[in-house]
Image (cartoon, grey):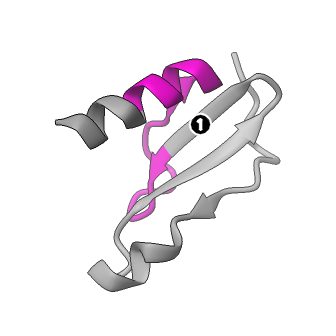
Amino acid sequence: MVDLSNATWRKASRSTSNGGDCVEVARVSDTVAIRDSKDPHGPKLLLTPQALHHLTRAIKNA
């Protein structure tokens, strides 16, 4: 289990163009955590940096 209690969450700089609704990311050790900025206490997606890279490439190419 990854402890996210002290995670520093970052929101994308472009998030202001859509009303501020965006995803946020935090790097904790060898894990990248992703959450919905509208629901910061909701579920988080935990990925390795490599998996995040593959996910973002797949989204860009979709």
Q: Residue at x 63, y 26 (%)?
A: 49
Amino acid at circle 1: Ala
Q: Residues within 10 Å of mark 1 (few under 14, many from 20)?
A: many
Judge whether 41 appears above or below 1 on screen: below
Q: Which quarter of the rendered picture does the N terminus lie within? A: top right
Q: Provide residue 62's location: percent of width, then percent of height.
A: 16, 36
Quadrant of residue 38 within the rendered picture: bottom left
Q: Is residue 18 shown left or right of residue 48? A: left
Taking the view exactly as shown, the residue that stands out farthest to the left is: 62
Taking the view exactly as shown, the residue that stands out farthest to the front is: 61
Q: Is residue 5 shown left or right of residue 57? A: right
Judge whether 5 appears above or below 20 on screen: above
Which residue, given by chain and number where applicable, does mark 1 sit on? 33
Residue 54 in magenta?
A: yes
- Label 1 SS: strand
**As rendered, which of 49 and 1 lies closer to the eye?**
49
Q: Residue at x 47, y 47 (%)?
A: 35
Judge whether 1 appears above or below 60 on screen: above
Residue 52 in magenta?
A: yes
Quadrant of residue 17 within the rendered picture: bottom left
Q: Provide residue 20's location: percent of width, then percent of height.
A: 39, 78
Tell me which segment is drawn in magenta: 35-55
Q: Provide residue 13's location: percent of width, then percent of height.
A: 52, 74
